[in-house]
Protein backbone atom coordinates (compact mmCIF):
# COMPACT_ATOMS: atom_id res chain seq x y z
CA UNK A 1 0.00 0.00 0.00
CA UNK A 2 1.29 3.41 -0.95
CA UNK A 3 2.22 5.81 1.84
CA UNK A 4 -0.38 8.49 0.94
CA UNK A 5 -3.15 5.85 0.99
CA UNK A 6 -1.95 4.53 4.33
CA UNK A 7 -1.86 8.03 5.76
CA UNK A 8 -5.36 8.65 4.47
CA UNK A 9 -6.64 5.43 6.08
CA UNK A 10 -4.93 6.25 9.37
CA UNK A 11 -6.46 9.71 9.27
CA UNK A 12 -9.93 8.27 8.65
CA UNK A 13 -9.43 5.76 11.47
CA UNK A 14 -8.44 8.53 13.83
CA UNK A 15 -11.56 10.48 12.90
CA UNK A 16 -13.72 7.40 13.42
CA UNK A 17 -12.17 6.78 16.82
CA UNK A 18 -12.66 10.41 17.79
CA UNK A 19 -16.28 10.26 16.68
CA UNK A 20 -16.85 7.03 18.61
CA UNK A 21 -15.30 8.56 21.70
CA UNK A 22 -17.50 11.61 21.30
CA UNK A 23 -20.62 9.43 21.08
CA UNK A 24 -19.55 7.40 24.11
CA UNK A 25 -18.92 10.56 26.07
CA UNK A 26 -22.29 12.00 25.11
CA UNK A 27 -23.98 8.75 26.22
CA UNK A 28 -22.73 9.05 29.79
CA UNK A 29 -23.74 11.19 32.76
CA UNK A 30 -21.97 11.28 36.11
CA UNK A 31 -24.02 11.87 39.26
CA UNK A 32 -22.83 12.67 42.78
CA UNK A 33 -25.68 11.83 45.13
CA UNK A 34 -26.18 12.39 48.85
CA UNK A 35 -29.13 10.01 48.66
CA UNK A 36 -28.45 6.39 49.52
CA UNK A 37 -27.89 4.18 46.50
CA UNK A 38 -31.07 2.17 47.09
CA UNK A 39 -33.11 5.39 47.03
CA UNK A 40 -31.84 6.63 43.68
CA UNK A 41 -30.14 3.87 41.67
CA UNK A 42 -33.31 2.04 40.51
CA UNK A 43 -34.76 5.15 38.88
CA UNK A 44 -31.39 5.90 37.24
CA UNK A 45 -31.36 2.38 35.83
CA UNK A 46 -34.83 2.96 34.38
CA UNK A 47 -33.51 6.08 32.68
CA UNK A 48 -30.58 4.15 31.18
CA UNK A 49 -32.90 1.44 29.88
CA UNK A 50 -35.07 4.00 28.14
CA UNK A 51 -32.32 6.20 26.69
CA UNK A 52 -29.20 4.07 26.40
CA UNK A 53 -27.34 6.72 28.41
CA UNK A 54 -25.07 5.24 31.06
CA UNK A 55 -25.35 6.79 34.52
CA UNK A 56 -22.29 6.59 36.71
CA UNK A 57 -23.32 7.08 40.32
CA UNK A 58 -21.22 8.10 43.30
CA UNK A 59 -23.07 8.22 46.64
CA UNK A 60 -21.85 9.57 49.94
CA UNK A 61 -22.33 12.10 52.70
CA UNK A 62 -23.63 15.38 51.31
CA UNK A 63 -21.01 17.56 52.99
CA UNK A 64 -18.21 15.22 51.91
CA UNK A 65 -19.44 15.21 48.31
CA UNK A 66 -19.68 19.00 48.30
CA UNK A 67 -16.11 19.25 49.61
CA UNK A 68 -15.03 16.84 46.88
CA UNK A 69 -16.70 18.94 44.20
CA UNK A 70 -14.95 22.05 45.50
CA UNK A 71 -11.57 20.31 45.56
CA UNK A 72 -12.00 18.81 42.09
CA UNK A 73 -12.93 22.14 40.55
CA UNK A 74 -12.95 22.11 36.77
CA UNK A 75 -11.52 18.58 36.80
CA UNK A 76 -14.59 17.07 38.42
CA UNK A 77 -16.24 14.24 36.48
CA UNK A 78 -19.59 15.13 38.09
CA UNK A 79 -22.30 16.48 35.82
CA UNK A 80 -25.05 16.56 38.44
CA UNK A 81 -25.13 16.95 42.21
CA UNK A 82 -28.19 15.61 44.02
CA UNK A 83 -28.73 16.29 47.72
CA UNK A 84 -31.48 16.70 50.30
CA UNK A 85 -32.75 19.86 51.99
CA UNK A 86 -32.82 23.37 50.57
CA UNK A 87 -30.21 24.39 53.14
CA UNK A 88 -27.70 21.96 51.68
CA UNK A 89 -28.57 22.99 48.13
CA UNK A 90 -28.03 26.63 49.11
CA UNK A 91 -24.58 25.77 50.51
CA UNK A 92 -23.69 24.10 47.23
CA UNK A 93 -24.85 27.16 45.30
CA UNK A 94 -22.84 29.43 47.61
CA UNK A 95 -19.79 27.24 46.95
CA UNK A 96 -20.20 28.07 43.23
CA UNK A 97 -20.40 24.47 42.05
CA UNK A 98 -23.60 24.92 40.00
CA UNK A 99 -24.42 26.57 36.69
CA UNK A 100 -27.95 27.90 36.01
CA UNK A 101 -30.52 25.49 34.61
CA UNK A 102 -31.67 27.16 31.40
CA UNK A 103 -33.85 24.45 29.83
CA UNK A 104 -37.35 25.94 30.05
CA UNK A 105 -39.03 22.55 29.63
CA UNK A 106 -37.31 21.39 32.84
CA UNK A 107 -37.95 24.58 34.80
CA UNK A 108 -41.62 24.71 33.82
CA UNK A 109 -42.34 21.29 35.32
CA UNK A 110 -41.77 22.44 38.90
CA UNK A 111 -43.42 25.44 40.63
CA UNK A 112 -41.07 28.40 40.78
CA UNK A 113 -40.89 28.44 44.59
CA UNK A 114 -39.13 25.06 44.36
CA UNK A 115 -36.30 26.56 42.28
CA UNK A 116 -33.03 27.77 43.74
CA UNK A 117 -31.91 31.37 43.32
CA UNK A 118 -31.08 32.06 39.65
CA UNK A 119 -32.33 28.53 38.86
CA UNK A 120 -29.08 27.04 40.17
CA UNK A 121 -30.99 23.96 41.36
CA UNK A 122 -34.47 22.51 41.19
CA UNK A 123 -36.57 20.42 43.56
CA UNK A 124 -37.21 16.76 42.76
CA UNK A 125 -39.40 15.68 45.67
CA UNK A 126 -40.99 17.18 48.78
CA UNK A 127 -40.75 16.06 52.39
CA UNK A 128 -43.23 17.41 54.95
CA UNK A 129 -42.20 18.06 58.59
CA UNK A 130 -45.40 18.08 60.67
CA UNK A 131 -46.21 17.32 64.32
CA UNK A 132 -46.77 13.72 65.44
CA UNK A 133 -48.98 13.03 68.45
CA UNK A 134 -49.89 10.06 70.66
CA UNK A 135 -53.29 8.77 69.53
CA UNK A 136 -54.28 7.61 73.01
CA UNK A 137 -53.21 10.71 74.92
CA UNK A 138 -53.71 13.74 72.68
CA UNK A 139 -56.89 15.20 71.22
CA UNK A 140 -55.82 16.83 67.91
CA UNK A 141 -58.33 19.61 68.55
CA UNK A 142 -55.84 20.80 71.21
CA UNK A 143 -53.35 21.63 68.45
CA UNK A 144 -53.20 24.38 65.87
CA UNK A 145 -49.62 24.82 64.68
CA UNK A 146 -45.90 24.86 65.34
CA UNK A 147 -46.50 27.56 67.96
CA UNK A 148 -48.09 24.89 70.20
CA UNK A 149 -44.71 23.22 70.66
CA UNK A 150 -43.66 26.14 72.89
CA UNK A 151 -46.91 26.37 74.87
CA UNK A 152 -46.88 25.72 78.65
CA UNK A 153 -49.48 22.99 78.13
CA UNK A 154 -46.80 20.74 76.62
CA UNK A 155 -44.16 21.24 79.31
CA UNK A 156 -41.67 18.32 79.30
CA UNK A 157 -43.73 16.71 76.56
CA UNK A 158 -42.06 17.47 73.20
CA UNK A 159 -39.46 15.34 71.37
CA UNK A 160 -37.33 16.68 68.52
CA UNK A 161 -33.82 16.07 67.29
CA UNK A 162 -30.87 18.42 67.75
CA UNK A 163 -30.22 21.86 66.31
CA UNK A 164 -27.35 20.36 64.30
CA UNK A 165 -29.94 18.69 62.10
CA UNK A 166 -30.44 20.54 58.81
CA UNK A 167 -34.18 19.68 58.80
CA UNK A 168 -34.67 21.59 62.06
CA UNK A 169 -32.48 24.42 60.84
CA UNK A 170 -34.65 24.77 57.75
CA UNK A 171 -37.86 24.64 59.78
CA UNK A 172 -36.52 27.43 61.99
CA UNK A 173 -35.40 29.38 58.92
CA UNK A 174 -38.94 29.14 57.55
CA UNK A 175 -40.44 30.35 60.83
CA UNK A 176 -38.04 33.31 60.84
CA UNK A 177 -39.43 34.28 57.43
CA UNK A 178 -43.01 34.02 58.69
CA UNK A 179 -42.67 35.34 62.26
CA UNK A 180 -39.44 37.34 62.35
CA UNK A 181 -36.35 36.70 64.45
CA UNK A 182 -37.67 37.90 67.81
CA UNK A 183 -40.87 35.83 67.78
CA UNK A 184 -39.06 32.76 66.46
CA UNK A 185 -36.40 33.01 69.18
CA UNK A 186 -39.11 33.24 71.82
CA UNK A 187 -40.71 30.14 70.30
CA UNK A 188 -37.37 28.28 70.29
CA UNK A 189 -36.82 29.07 74.00
CA UNK A 190 -40.29 27.78 74.82
CA UNK A 191 -39.65 24.67 72.74
CA UNK A 192 -36.41 23.96 74.61
CA UNK A 193 -38.25 24.37 77.93
CA UNK A 194 -40.73 21.73 76.76
CA UNK A 195 -38.15 19.09 75.80
CA UNK A 196 -39.11 15.73 77.31
CA UNK A 197 -35.57 14.43 76.76
CA UNK A 198 -32.27 15.64 75.33
CA UNK A 199 -32.64 16.19 71.55
CA UNK A 200 -30.66 13.14 70.47
CA UNK A 201 -31.31 10.52 67.82
CA UNK A 202 -32.99 10.69 64.45
CA UNK A 203 -36.57 11.33 63.42
CA UNK A 204 -37.58 7.71 63.92
CA UNK A 205 -36.31 7.91 67.50
CA UNK A 206 -38.61 10.88 68.17
CA UNK A 207 -41.63 8.97 66.82
CA UNK A 208 -40.69 5.93 68.91
CA UNK A 209 -40.43 8.16 71.98
CA UNK A 210 -44.04 9.28 71.49
CA UNK A 211 -45.15 5.65 71.12
CA UNK A 212 -43.27 4.71 74.29
CA UNK A 213 -44.86 7.50 76.35
CA UNK A 214 -41.68 9.56 76.75
CA UNK A 215 -43.46 12.53 75.14
CA UNK A 216 -46.86 13.28 73.65
CA UNK A 217 -45.67 15.35 70.66
CA UNK A 218 -42.76 15.04 68.24
CA UNK A 219 -41.55 16.71 65.07
CA UNK A 220 -40.33 14.52 62.21
CA UNK A 221 -40.41 14.11 58.45
CA UNK A 222 -43.38 12.06 57.26
CA UNK A 223 -41.37 9.63 55.16
CA UNK A 224 -39.86 8.19 58.35
CA UNK A 225 -43.36 7.19 59.43
CA UNK A 226 -43.81 5.52 56.04
CA UNK A 227 -40.59 3.58 56.51
CA UNK A 228 -41.73 2.47 59.97
CA UNK A 229 -45.19 1.45 58.74
CA UNK A 230 -43.60 -0.78 56.07
CA UNK A 231 -40.71 -1.99 58.25
CA UNK A 232 -39.81 -5.67 58.65
CA UNK A 233 -39.31 -4.85 62.35
CA UNK A 234 -42.55 -5.55 64.24
CA UNK A 235 -41.62 -3.06 66.99
CA UNK A 236 -41.26 -0.25 64.44
CA UNK A 237 -44.62 -1.09 62.90
CA UNK A 238 -46.24 -1.13 66.35
CA UNK A 239 -44.69 2.23 67.25
CA UNK A 240 -45.95 3.73 63.99
CA UNK A 241 -49.47 2.51 64.74
CA UNK A 242 -49.54 4.48 68.02
CA UNK A 243 -48.98 7.91 66.49
CA UNK A 244 -50.87 10.16 64.10
CA UNK A 245 -49.94 13.18 62.02
CA UNK A 246 -51.17 16.66 62.79
CA UNK A 247 -50.76 19.09 59.91
CA UNK A 248 -49.70 22.42 61.49
CA UNK A 249 -50.79 25.93 60.56
CA UNK A 250 -53.52 24.99 58.11
CA UNK A 251 -55.28 28.32 58.64
CA UNK A 252 -52.11 30.36 58.09
CA UNK A 253 -48.98 29.61 56.06
CA UNK A 254 -49.29 25.82 55.99
CA UNK A 255 -47.12 22.87 56.99
CA UNK A 256 -43.38 23.22 56.46
CA UNK A 257 -42.03 21.25 53.49
CA UNK A 258 -38.53 20.85 52.17
CA UNK A 259 -36.99 19.32 49.07
CA UNK A 260 -34.54 16.89 47.69
CA UNK A 261 -33.04 18.63 44.68
CA UNK A 262 -30.53 18.54 41.90
CA UNK A 263 -28.21 20.96 40.14
CA UNK A 264 -26.08 20.96 37.00
CA UNK A 265 -22.43 21.29 37.96
CA UNK A 266 -20.50 24.31 36.74
CA UNK A 267 -17.99 22.12 34.91
CA UNK A 268 -20.38 19.46 33.57
CA UNK A 269 -18.83 17.72 30.58
CA UNK A 270 -21.99 15.85 29.57
CA UNK A 271 -24.50 18.68 29.78
CA UNK A 272 -26.98 17.37 27.21
CA UNK A 273 -27.18 13.94 28.83
CA UNK A 274 -27.39 15.53 32.28
CA UNK A 275 -30.35 17.66 31.18
CA UNK A 276 -32.05 14.56 29.78
CA UNK A 277 -31.68 12.89 33.16
CA UNK A 278 -33.06 15.90 35.04
CA UNK A 279 -36.01 15.94 32.67
CA UNK A 280 -36.62 12.23 33.29
CA UNK A 281 -36.47 12.65 37.08
CA UNK A 282 -39.35 15.10 36.71
CA UNK A 283 -41.43 12.76 34.55
CA UNK A 284 -44.64 11.29 36.02
CA UNK A 285 -43.05 7.83 36.00
CA UNK A 286 -40.02 8.90 38.06
CA UNK A 287 -42.09 11.14 40.34
CA UNK A 288 -44.46 8.27 41.15
CA UNK A 289 -41.48 6.03 41.88
CA UNK A 290 -40.15 8.58 44.36
CA UNK A 291 -43.53 8.72 46.09
CA UNK A 292 -43.96 4.94 46.25
CA UNK A 293 -40.39 4.13 47.25
CA UNK A 294 -39.39 7.06 49.45
CA UNK A 295 -42.79 8.20 50.74
CA UNK A 296 -42.02 11.71 49.51
CA UNK A 297 -44.43 14.06 47.78
CA UNK A 298 -44.00 14.71 44.04
CA UNK A 299 -42.52 18.09 43.15
CA UNK A 300 -44.46 18.02 39.89
CA UNK A 301 -48.07 19.06 40.35
CA UNK A 302 -50.75 16.64 39.22
CA UNK A 303 -48.74 13.45 39.79
CA UNK A 304 -50.75 10.91 41.78
CA UNK A 305 -49.65 10.38 45.37
CA UNK A 306 -48.74 6.89 46.58
CA UNK A 307 -51.15 5.03 48.86
CA UNK A 308 -49.37 5.89 52.15
CA UNK A 309 -49.34 9.59 51.24
CA UNK A 310 -53.03 9.47 50.40
CA UNK A 311 -53.77 7.70 53.69
CA UNK A 312 -52.13 10.54 55.62
CA UNK A 313 -54.57 12.98 54.04
CA UNK A 314 -54.47 16.18 52.04
CA UNK A 315 -53.00 19.29 53.65
CA UNK A 316 -51.94 22.84 52.89
CA UNK A 317 -48.21 23.05 52.19
CA UNK A 318 -46.16 26.13 52.93
CA UNK A 319 -45.27 27.62 49.53
CA UNK A 320 -42.36 29.66 50.85
CA UNK A 321 -39.51 30.14 48.38
CA UNK A 322 -37.13 27.24 49.05
CA UNK A 323 -34.13 29.52 48.58
CA UNK A 324 -35.13 31.39 51.75
CA UNK A 325 -34.41 28.29 53.85
CA UNK A 326 -30.76 28.50 52.87
CA UNK A 327 -30.56 32.27 53.04
CA UNK A 328 -31.91 32.27 56.62
CA UNK A 329 -29.82 29.31 57.76
CA UNK A 330 -27.01 31.21 59.50
CA UNK A 331 -29.48 33.37 61.41
CA UNK A 332 -31.48 30.27 62.35
CA UNK A 333 -28.44 28.43 63.72
CA UNK A 334 -27.38 31.40 65.86
CA UNK A 335 -30.93 31.80 67.14
CA UNK A 336 -31.16 28.11 68.05
CA UNK A 337 -27.86 28.31 69.92
CA UNK A 338 -29.02 31.38 71.90
CA UNK A 339 -32.20 29.49 72.83
CA UNK A 340 -30.15 26.62 74.27
CA UNK A 341 -31.24 24.14 71.61
CA UNK A 342 -28.31 21.75 71.45
Image: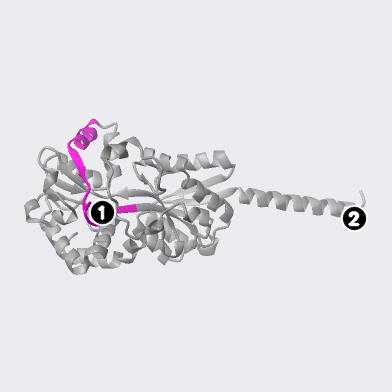
Left or right relative to 159: residue 28: right
Q: Label 2's element?
A: helix
Residue 91 appears in the figure? yes
User: Is residue 216 visible in the rendered structure shown here?
Assistant: no
Expressed as whole percent of the image width and height from the top left, the position of residue 325 reads 32, 61
Q: Which mark is residue 300?
A: none
| Horizontal side of residue 31 vs 291, given as left or right | right
Residue occupied by mark 1: 254
Mark 1 closeness class: few <14, some 14–19, many ≥20 residues within 10 Å: some
On the image, the x and y values in percent for residue 97 come to: 47, 63
Residue pictured at 36% horizontal, 52% vertical? 259
Pick out the residue farthest to the front: 251
Question: Label 2 crowding class (10 Å Cα cut-off): few <14, some 14-19, many 20+?
Answer: few
Residue situated in front as seen by the camera: 258 or 18: 258
Assign the C terminus to one quadrant of the image. bottom left
The x and y percentages for residue 180 are 22, 67
Q: Residue at label 2? A: 4
State the residue in front, 291 or 20: 291
Q: Is 153 in the magenta?
A: no
Nearer to the camera, 202 or 174 = 174
Magenta stretch in the rendered image: 234-258
When asked about the image quadrant of residue 38, the answer is top left
- Residue 240 among those drawn in magenta: yes
For mark 1, give the secondary structure: loop
Closer to the camera: disc 2 or disc 1? 1
* Marks 2 & 1, CB-CB < 8 Å contact: no
The quarter of the displayed image where residue 227 is located = top left
User: x, y (%) of residue 57?
Assistant: 49, 47
Amino acid sequence: MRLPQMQKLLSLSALALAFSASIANAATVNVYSARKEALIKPVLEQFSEKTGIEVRLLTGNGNALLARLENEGENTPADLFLTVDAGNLHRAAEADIFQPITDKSILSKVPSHLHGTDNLWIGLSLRARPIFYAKDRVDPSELSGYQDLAADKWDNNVCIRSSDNIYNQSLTAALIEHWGVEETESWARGLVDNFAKPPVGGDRDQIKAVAAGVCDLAVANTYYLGLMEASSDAEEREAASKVAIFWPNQTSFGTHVNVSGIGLTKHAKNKAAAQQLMDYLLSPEAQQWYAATNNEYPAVEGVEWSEPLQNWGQFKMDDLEMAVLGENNAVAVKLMNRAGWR
